[in-house]
Amino acid sequence: MVTQNFLYDAILYIYALSLLFYFSDFMNASQRAKRMGTGLLIFVWVLQTGYLISRVVMHLQMTTVTAFEYWLGFSWLLVTTSIVINRFFKIDFIVFFVNVVGFAVLALNLYSNPGSGGSLELWKTTRELLYIHISLVLCAYAALTIGALFAGMYLFLHNQLKRKRWTNFVRRLPSLDLMERYGDRAVIIGVPLLAMSLAIAVTSLLVEGRAALLLDWKVLSSFGTLIVYGIYVYQRAMLKRPGLQLARLYIFAFGLLLLNLFSNYFSSFH
């Protein structure tokens, strides 16, 4: 077994099997494989939900929120979102791409140190805000990750159309307009959530008299990322920039978001 926890192992193996079916559909447009992948993905969601709830209940009385629970929640959000997309929007490939990210997060989470995490003792007067902050930022990351996938698909399809490469793969992709529309919806959801999570974090630091942490690298890079996303929103809503330019800016903004995610090594905030 990969880990000592049987349920976590089961989730990983079933998730991998689901991805194999989705990849079969990805390569050969097989509706049967897609249905099998979807059924297994729903089963993964059920197991993951139960596992996440059990972890939350176990840690209610503890003073730390570990990276393990943090990334487990992020993966769960991606699985949930992909099921919703598959049920209501019927967009080829995006479910596969989202779950590749979700599976990677779940697998890499095995290397998380269960003993590490943000101490709740540091949030003595604003402990409830910490939970809200974490919930908001996880939802923001999930929405912006999906938006980045749409932006990447947009750039790929635009390049293929420019070169007049009409393959079966290209024909199955959603239109540029559709990808642009759903990418915008991801931004509409993700950016406000990110802004609210940062506002809560700043408020908590000020209330607790730890204003010096506002100059921490993690905080500064978070605000820098939010500013870039704000530039994207402004160019989209006010300047009506072409979709190609916006997709490139979105990828750049998401790159900053990833940099921020992995900046904990240089930060004393998280």
Image (spheres, rainbow, N blue to C red):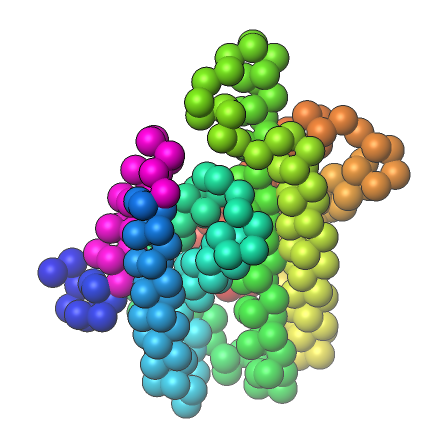
Q: In this view, does 1 lie above or below 61?
A: above
Start and end of the magenta stretch? 11-31
- Residue 205 percent coordinates (x, y): 66, 72
Label tally: 0
Name the residue furthest front: 32
Q: Splitting the image into 4 quarters, where does residue 4 fall?
A: bottom left
Residue 16 lies within the magenta run: yes
User: In the shown orientation, is residue 236 left or right of residue 135?
Assistant: right
Q: Is residue 258 above or below residue 46?
A: above
Task: Give the residue drawn at x 26%, y 50%.
Answer: 16
Q: Is residue 128 above or below residue 222?
A: below
- Residue 199 percent coordinates (x, y): 72, 66
On the question of residue 100 being in view, the answer is no
Task: Give the residue drawn at x 72%, y 52%.
Answer: 188
**Closer to us: 65 or 235:** 235
Name the residue furthest top: 163
Name the residue furthest right: 238
Task: Give the residue drawn at x 44%, y 52%.
Answer: 265
- The majority secondary structure of the magenta stretch comes to helix
The quarter of the image holding the N terminus is bottom left
On the question of residue 51 being in view, the answer is yes
Q: In this view, does 21 lie above or below 165?
A: below
Q: Splitting the image into 4 quarters, where does residue 117 fall?
A: bottom left
**Closer to us: 203 or 145:** 145
Residue 265 lies within the magenta run: no
- Residue 171 percent coordinates (x, y): 51, 25
**Closer to us: 157 or 72:** 157
